Image (tube, rainbow, N blue to C red):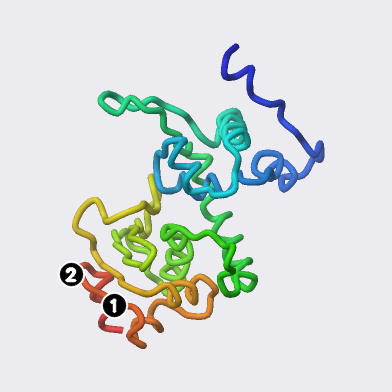
Amino acid sequence: MSRLRRMSPRRSYDQYCSAARALDAVGDRWTLLIVRELLAGPRRYTDLHADLPGVSTDVLAGRLRDMERDGLATRRRLPPPGAAYVYELTPRGRELLPVLQALGRWGEGDLGERRPTDAVRAHWFALPLLRALDDEGFRDVQLVEVHLEEGDFHLHVGAQDGPVHGEGPAPREPDARLALDAATCAAVARGQSGVLEAVRAGRIAVSGEGTLAKALREA
């Protein structure tokens, strides 16, 4: 049976409304969080499953098939020696970035303190940091490496296409390096602190010779 035939039929609100149409595509549980992960670029199924704690293998596979059907993601095979399949966002799928950012901003007040049952991944702070940098006017294309206690990730500030963040150190010499603790990053994610405020207070250490690093230090 073809992969297309195995895809579940599209569920619809059957309402002539653009919001309802959007929710037809992304309103199912986990879909937008899969988009969050794919904003880091192509990901293998096993990597997605590892970074989406709580999702079952069946649900994840089903959501990915639905996203392919709806034109939000594609699946391709890497050339040897990798030869693994990866999923990546289409241009239409990447257009959900401002939607996720708006949802993140809306949910800042509900984030509160981390609960004992809350999972965390370092790169989940990528979108809040991008929002905070954007709020303070840092929108030029810059590569930023971020060091947290939970791990390292990098940001593509101002990127108009391609990945907006990624796990691990930057793939080349970054324009700026930011080092901060989990409490400071959580305060930024909750909207309680801006990046400049945290730099001035000594809670974010800045290094690097790019324009962003210099601007943050001069602030």
For the residue carrying disc 1, how many other residues have a C-alpha within 10 Å: few (<14), some (14-19), or many (20+)? some
Task: Give SS at disc 2.
Answer: loop
- Vertical placement of 154 versus 34: above or below? below
What's the CA distance linking mark 2 and mark 1?
A: 13 Å
Residue type at the position of mark 1: Ala
* Observer-nearest of 142 and 166: 166
Residue 44, picture quadrant:
top left
21 left or right, relative to 100: right
Type of amino acid at the residue the image marks with label 2? Glu
Q: In the image, residue 161 lies at what x, y percent?
A: 40, 46
Figure check: 38 above or below 1: below
Q: Residue furthest front?
A: 116
- Residue 19, image x, y percentages: 72, 48
Q: Which mark is residue 205?
A: 1
User: Along the line of sight, which residue is nearer the eye, 134 or 196?
Assistant: 196
| Count of marks, rendered view | 2
Q: Residues within 10 Å of mark 2 (few under 14, many from 20)?
A: some
Which quadrant would residue 218 be assigned to in this image?
bottom left
Seen as rendered, the residue at the extreme bottom is 201
Image height check: is 176 above or below 66? below
The N terminus - image quarter: top right
Which residue shows up at 52% across the image and 41% down it?
Answer: 93
Identify the residue at horizontal 77%, vertical 44% (top origin).
17
- Give the residue at x 68% y 43%: 28
> Against 155, is 13 above or below?
above
Residue 47 picture location, percent across and down: 43, 41
Q: Where is mark 2, residue-wise?
A: 209
Dot 1: element: strand
Foreground residue, 123 or 130? 123
The C terminus is located in which quarter? Answer: bottom left
Rendered residue at 39%/82% (across/down): 198
